[in-house]
Amino acid sequence: MAGLPPKARASFARGRCVRGTYAPSDRAKEITKSCSFTKPSRVLARFSVEGSLRTNDTLLRGFSFRLGSDGQRSEILTQSAPVHFARTLEQMLAFIRARIPGPDGQPDLAKIEAFSAANPETLHQASYIAAHPPPASLACTTYWGVHAFPATNSKGETRFIKFKVTPVGEQTTEVKLRIKSAELLHDDLESRIAARDIRFSVMALLDHPGDPVMDVTMRWPDENGREAVRLGTIVITGVAANDTFFNPATLAEGISYPPDEMFAARRAAYAISQARRR
Ligand code: HEM
């Protein structure tokens, strides 16, 4: 549907790989015993933009990162919206099918509208993006892990957390402006890396009893006002070769797989996509 060349990623196809460091906060251990979050490590990451090559739309962005060292690695894939566009796999496939361009190269708007009316939760992501246009830089964007991840601390206590990755420093005050070109976003990224200007807090939003942990189209009630613990800080220090694969199924002990249907599908989908790309 996106008109991507062979071997491109199935989504978030345009991006840049980068490297950096992770430093844990003093409070990380309260949330998880995962060595990848409680110990300092090198980081391999990738900033990306979602969207079709035809429209050059860059409104949804991705940030994937790998923390930890041998045997204790975790890969967290985040995007610049707190919700996914579909609750079930069947709905995701129907959402994509409804947008396949016709013979004239244009999608059928009536079909999309009918699908949206019958599946209102598939509009939550687009509504969020419309109300919160992303800032001009990938480095100033806030990213979410979307799913509810069970996190177990060293006392053996388990609770759900959501990952939120927030930019640190003056950059966050930058004027909000829509940039539609992926190239400009990547140029901006590279100049900020050279200036050592990219730093993020990795936050854990803490659950409350009764939170909807099975539905990736819903935020938790008053999610913005939630208690959040900073697990650590990522500093981006350089560009890396563009040959990295990220898989959300890679999680070191202390953070477990989210229980929803979409994450179960992702555990298989990335490996299939990557095998085909190789
Ligand atoms: C629910 C929230 C989701 C988030 C935050 C998310 C995030 C991402 C990101 C950031 C990438 C780019 C990875 C990179 O930089 O290398 C990606 C790629 C991809 N995503 Fe997702 N995704 C989500 C849901 C899904 C679902 C439900 C599926 C399928 C069932 C899926 C399938 C894929 C595939 C196949 C790729 C390409 C992988 C590759 O070839 O390397 N994603 N996703």
Image: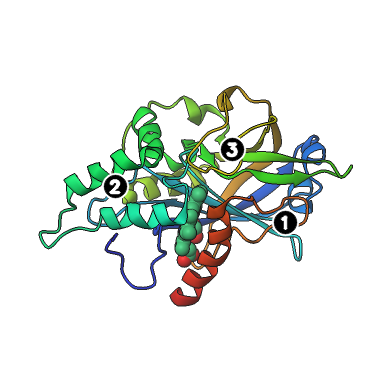
Return the x and y of residue 205 as percentages of the image width and height.
65, 33
Q: Mark 1 points at which residue?
A: 68
Left or right: 107 as drawn, with respect to 225: left
Please state which amino acid type lies under the numbered disc 3: Lys
Q: Residue 57 carries which label?
A: 2
Amino acid at pointer 1: Gly
The residue lying toward the viewer, choosing from 277 and 91, is 91
| Quadrant housing residue 147 | top right
Residue at the disc numbered 3: 164
- In the image, residue 239 above or below residue 209: below
Residue furthest toward the left? 104
Label 2 element class: loop
| Sequence-wise first label, 1 or 2 | 2
Q: Residue at x 17, y 45 (%)?
A: 110
Q: Is mark 1 within 8 Å of ligand 1?
A: no
Q: Quadrant of the N terminus?
A: bottom left
Q: Residues within 10 Å of mark 2 (few under 14, many from 20)?
A: some
Type of residue at label 2? Asp
Q: Helix, strand, or loop for circle 3?
A: strand
Q: Indicate left or right for 100 with 273 as reference.
A: left
